[in-house]
Amino acid sequence: MKDITEHQNSEVEFRNNMKIWQLSLDAIKEAIFLIDLNHKILQCNKATLDIFRKSNYKEVIGHYCWELMHDNSEPKELCPLKRMQQSGKKETVIEMVNGCLVEISANPVFDYKGEINGAVHVITDITSRKRIVDALRESEQQYRTILNSLNDPMHVIDKELKIIFQNPTMVKWLDKLNLKSDIIAKNIFEVFPFLDYDKIYNEYSKVFKTGEPFVTREITELFNKKVFTEIIKIPIKSEGKVDQVITIIRDITEQKEAEQKLKNSEEKYRYLIENSIEGVWVIDSGAKTILVNPSMSKILGYKVEEMIGKPLFSFMDKKEKEITKNHLEKRKKGISEERDAYFLHKKGYKVYLRIRATPIFDIEGNYEGTSAFLADITQRKLTEQALKESEEKYRLISENTDDLIVVYNENELVDYFNTETHSRILGYSTEKFKDKVFRDALVHEDDREIAETKVSEGLKKGSYYYQFRLKHKSGNYIWFEVTGKIFEDNYGNTKILCVSRNIDAKKSAEYKIKESEENFRTIAEQAFIGTLIIQDDKVEYVNSALLQIFEYSHEEINNWRKKDLVKLIYPEDLQYLREYREKLRAGESDIKRYYTYRVFTKYGKIRWIDQFSRPIIYRGKRAELVSIMDITEKKRAEQELMKLNSLKSELLRRTSHELKTPLVSIKGFSDLLLTVHKDKLDDYVLATIHEIKLGCERLENLIQDILKTSELDSKSVELKKSEENLSFLIKLCVKELQGLIRLRNHKISLEIHDKLIASFEPDQIHLVISNILNNAIKYTPPNGKIKIRSAIVDDSILILIRDNGIGITYEEKKRLFSQFGKIERYGQGLDIISEGSGLGLFITKKIVELHGGKIWVKSGGRNKGSTFYFTLPLI
């Protein structure tokens, strides 16, 4: 209410200022009008109508000033407004308008930012002064008579700037200013010592030289009072030369004070408008926008300049436009009103506004337009609409829900109930539910007392809950859970909202769950796997198998909480378990769904267990089901197997070293025979020695693979990584195998990045690429195609080597990367090179994994080619 009062007071003050402003303008005899920077007249006084010879304001306001002055389509070159925009200060010119000689001054108007946004034009008819000059030239007598009769102070000076004549008005004016009036034959600087010598001297010199009138406006401070004067210097020619100058001094102090008051009033009026929280909108008689304040433009999403000059209707849709036209007819009849309307925001959506509109009439009673204050009520409208929709929605929901909804008054009489739902759920006609006795009789006799008790308690507490049974038309009773809430309506009346939900299925489910729990206990007690249920951080159930694993009794573990179970975990495994559970909660996909760790039994024994956990619903609440397997014996067997593997690796390593010594001798002697004694041996012997040498090389490669495998199995490999270009290494491997590629007549294509910088040990990754590429060459029949591609996937470099060779079957994939996983293909009619130890891909996989990468293979099956993939981490 306070805000509305303040807005109304602002509006009244606004209207009063408008009236004062217009009356002040009309009281001034000079034509005064306000124009914008586009030369369009926004407001004017009555004297403006006279100077432009118009009968009403409509013919002036909204028109361009140059059209009215000169009947031109654009301003003249010496337009004072254009000059004012350039200089930033007042500019004055003398022009002929409608046959009259007038002086036009453009006074800048600044906005709140200090920028020029318009001008106040003052037009003074100086035709009479011009006529005076003409008369002086015709007759000295007439000249003196006219000069003496002027209402403005006037004096005449000669070329020496001495005063040779003054009129009576000049004498009176000097006396008024307490200046000496005996000025004849005196120099003007003697009479007016306060004048700027250079300025005045130059002005008179210009008039004497050019023979053109000169007009200035001066501010002089006399006796602590500012005096505003307009000085017109008019040349008097004799025989074509200027020998005297008439100086007419117009005291415009009162006019200036009136202008200042007008400006102050306008500034106050403008300040009120531009700082108003509400929007202000003024239209002319044709409904065109002539003024909006920043608040108004902001409400609709425009800039002020975007709205000025546009029709009011351009901000409305067709429907609102027709409504507004009817209301504007009321404005023309002088009717003010308040109403709600909507406008279109610049972005296209509706903005609802509360409008207080008032008509504007000129002093002759002609309708000039409408001013309005507008408040944004969009949020209120949207809230009202949402409330209406909400009421309709909830009524629709109420009638279509399966819940029985009843609203009682404080006397427990029904105000509302969803009749359709009652009838559908309970099977009775809607009319029967209006009878209270009938409704009460539907409650099971065992539940009536609890229903009355709970409602009574609810009236005190504000809410209640209970379960009860209602009789269906078929004779069966249905279980319902009742939620009640006490509230007050908009009129302060106490109401009871009662919602009854069918829980018959839930009750049946609870019975089945109870039965299921009994079955679960029976099964769990017979199982060999330990089982426990943890709920609300407490151990709710353990089976006999779990008690046997930990060597506790039911009585000892009965009141245990989760922290008691944590105490049983082997200390070195506790941190691992915490980290594992964090990864599990984070949803990491590459971890197993169970965890293995050590625990203590009651008697201090250490046992290895596998634990599986998953969330369940137990007795209607969330719980954790934990299954535990004792794998102590399995762990002992694994440790024994690891020892055996270690012994195997050591045996292979030592055997390989023992084989290398005689192998070097055999190979050395073979080379000696083939080089030194070749000419002494026949072809058969040479062929035999050559086979011995090839056998040595194959055996040497096998030993190298065995030693490499043993080294990788020992987990003692320390990689010597460095930042390298993987692309260069791939190209090197291809170049090294060009001989074999040409031998098999394969085509090989590279689609790799120019630079693939990663951190790896070059020799190791060289072995990886060579092994995979070697297999692709060997296991692809002649005239095959091999492609090597690279890609950046997530944070890794992906390399794929694809061939169109003999492919890999599903069964072959299973042992492809295992030790001695060589797949024999002799006698299958395949034109391939199948020699090898069967350790190459095993070694390759180990090296890739040591570098933090992965390796895998894809194949469509036999004769459908293979694609080997491996990744290395990016830097």
Image (cartoon, rainbow, N blue to C red):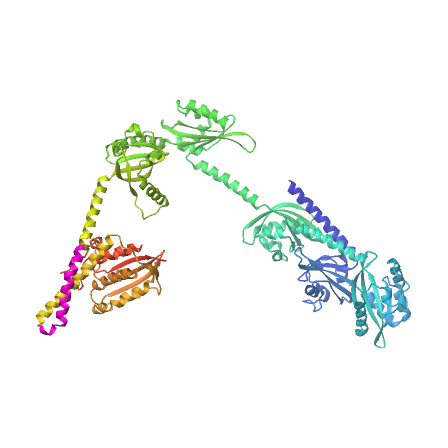
Query: Which residue is rendered at x = 20% and y = 45% of the image?
Result: 640
Is 156 left or right of 856, judged from the image as shown?
A: right
Name the quadrant containing residue 835.
bottom left
> Would you say residue 674 sits in the magenta stretch?
yes
The spot of residue 187 in percent (x, y) is: 87, 68
Residue 444 visible in the snapshot: yes
Q: Quadrant of the N terminus?
A: top right
Vertical side of 231 occupied by 443: above or below: above
Vertical side of 420 occupied by 291: above or below: below
The spot of residue 301 in percent (x, y) is: 57, 53
Q: In which quarter of the image is the C terminus?
A: bottom left
Vertical side of 40 occupied by 415: above or below: above
Name the quadrant containing residue 578.
top left
> Would you say residue 660 sits in the magenta stretch?
yes
Q: Main secondary structure of the magenta part?
A: helix
Q: Give the range drawn in magenta.
A: 654-680
* Front in this rendered view, residue 703 or 407: 703
